[in-house]
Structure formats: C-alpha cells, structure tokens
Image: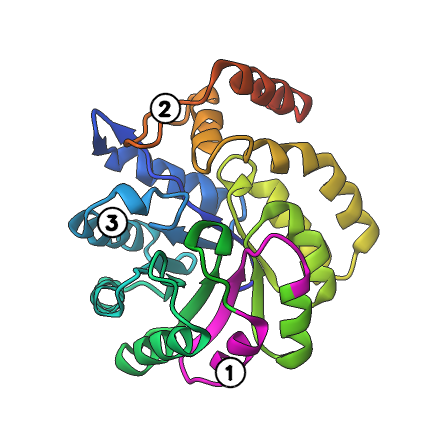
Amino acid sequence: MFQGSIVALATPLNGGQVDKEKLKELVDFQIKNGTQGIVSMGTTGEAATMSHEEDIEITALVVKHVNGRIPVIAGTGSNSTREALFLTEAAKKSGADAALVVTPYYNKPTQEGLYQHFKYLAENVDIPIILYNVPSRTGVWLQPETMARLSKVTGIVAVKESSGGVDAAMHLLRLAPDFTVLSGDDNFTLPLMALGAKGVISVAANVIPDKVSTLCRFMLNGDYPAARKLHYELLDFFKGIFIESNPIPIKAALALLGMIKEEYRLPLVPMGDANRERLKVIMKDLGLSV
C-alpha cells in the first residue's frame, strides 16, 4: 500500500481558519497528477499549530473527499503517548488508512522508551503505523537497531526516514530488508530508493506531483538513467523548498502559482524577500509560471 510518491499535504489557511474548499482542490490536484498517497496533518500541514479538534476534522475531511481513491495517512504524533493514542484512535475512527507517528519530541526518551511508545500504540489501535524519524525537529534519533526491533511488531508497517542522510536507512535495510522505508527528504529519494526504499513522503509533490511520482516510478521499475536525469532536473527545487523552515517555502510556491493564499500561523511567518526571489528563479527554471 505504501510506496511511490506520497504527498505531505500543505494546509491552506484563510483569515486564520482552514480553507476547506482549497484543501479539497489540493487533494484533487494530487490525485489527478499521479500521487499515490496523502499525508494529512504532518509537518507540512502545520499540525504543530493546529488544535486536536482541527487535526481530527481536517483528516476526516481529507478521508471523505479522497473517498478511497488513494490511501490517506494521518499524522498523529505527540510527545505524550496518551495524546498520540488519542489522535491515532481518532484517525482510525475517521477512516484513515494509516497513522504517521513522529518520535516523541522535547522529552528525549531513551531507545527503550521509543520502542515502548510505538509498541503501545500498535497494540492498542488497529491501524497500520508508519514511524517518523526526524531528529532535526524532535531532538531524538530513532536508531536503526530500534527501528529493526519495531519492524517485528504487528501493525508497524513502515518508517519515514528523515535523518538527513543515507546511513540510517542503509543500516536499517541491512537489518530488516523486508521493512518498508520511505524517504522523508525529496533530495534523498533517489539514493534511498537505490538502497531499497519504496518511495517518498514528499514536500515537493505539493507543487510537482507528476514529476515526483514519475521519479518514484522510474526507480521502482529499475530505470535508473531516467530517474537520475529527472533527479538532477528537480534537485534545485528540492533544495529550494527548504531554504526556510518547512512549510514556509512550499506554501509560498503554492501561492505563487495561485493555488492557495499565502498564510501561516505564528510562529511561522511569510518568506523573506530575498529567499522569495530565489524561489521564483528556481521555479521559473523548472518551467513553472510564477
């Protein structure tokens, strides 16, 4: 179920509230352009600034609008296991196909604490769970050995690997070759898939879903020359959407294309003028009309 290009969907805002009609338009745009799954309420969806009620409502809306066309994965992580359980149960109730659960942030649990956290969720909610390893944001690294242990827990089906390189995924795939690894960074999609990963949970796909989906298809089909050529064509964009904290650049890009209003919730603020001009140049070079 979880392979290819899975978009980490941005959440459009208008006047401080979620723009539900624009959200539906973004969903349709993704499905029309070949995206193979949608993550609702992940980092790119600004889940950290949303209330639990909004988290639950937005995921339910996405699930309803997708209507079974592609899988929907709900972001349900928290630094409290009780809170993560509550959100994961709500995702299950909404009809989501899986839950994306980030490592508990701020309180910096041990590897055993991380193992017990994810094991508890898997044992108490009947929904596929995708681990999310992103130490740059959480302050804790889910080590490959711990991920390999968790791969044996019923209900834990994959990991979004965002540790900023290939070492962790390479080590994990050697320890647990049948476990599904998804790149969490667009610029590492090709190298991680070359090592055995199955796809990407993509920020770039918000704007170029067809190209990210094609890149993944080339890799899954073993057409490495075509994949490599496309990877280098997209590399500047992959890097450009992280010149400021995600999701600021990708929402700016969507706004430049007229797809959403550029609006964030504090502490996120609009992109700086110099970086906005850099992003415009990158987008124009990619053939996007800004």
Q: In this view, does 161 lie to the left or right of 103?
A: right
Assign a secondary structure to mark 1.
helix
Is residue 171 visible in the rendered image? The answer is: yes
Q: Where is residue 85 in the image (x, y as percent from the top left)?
A: 24, 69
Q: Distance between the residues labelled 2 and 1?
A: 42 Å
1 or 3: tag closer to the N-terminus:
3
Q: Where is residue 15 in the image (x, y as percent from the top left)?
A: 21, 24
Amino acid type, label 1: Arg
Question: Label 3: how many residues lie within 10 Å, few (<14), some (14-19) or many (20+)?
Answer: some
Q: Nearer the viewer, mark 1 or mark 3?
A: 1
Q: In this view, does 12 lie above or below 94?
A: above
Instruction: Name the residue rendered at 51%, 80% in the picture.
Output: 151
Give the labeled residue for mark 1: 149
Viewport quadrant of the C terminus: top right
Tell which of 48 and 37 is nearer to you.
Answer: 48
Amino acid type, label 2: Glu
Q: Position of residue 221 (x, y in %)?
A: 73, 61
Question: Label 1: how many residues lie within 10 Å, few (<14), some (14-19) or many (20+)?
Answer: few
Q: Is residue 33 left or right of residue 124?
A: right
2 or 1: tag closer to the N-terminus:
1
Q: What stretch is highlighted in magenta?
A: 143-167
- How many labels were placed on the picture? 3
Give the labeled residue for mark 3: 61
Tell which of 226 and 32 is nearer to you.
Answer: 226
Q: In this view, does 195 lie above or below 241?
A: below
Instruction: Name the residue rendered at 79%, 56% in the picture.
Output: 223
Residue 262 numbered tag: 2
C-beta proximity under 8 Å, tags 3 and 2: no
**Image quadrant of residue 179?**
bottom right
Q: Is residue 123 above or below residue 181?
A: below
Residue 28 numbered tag: none
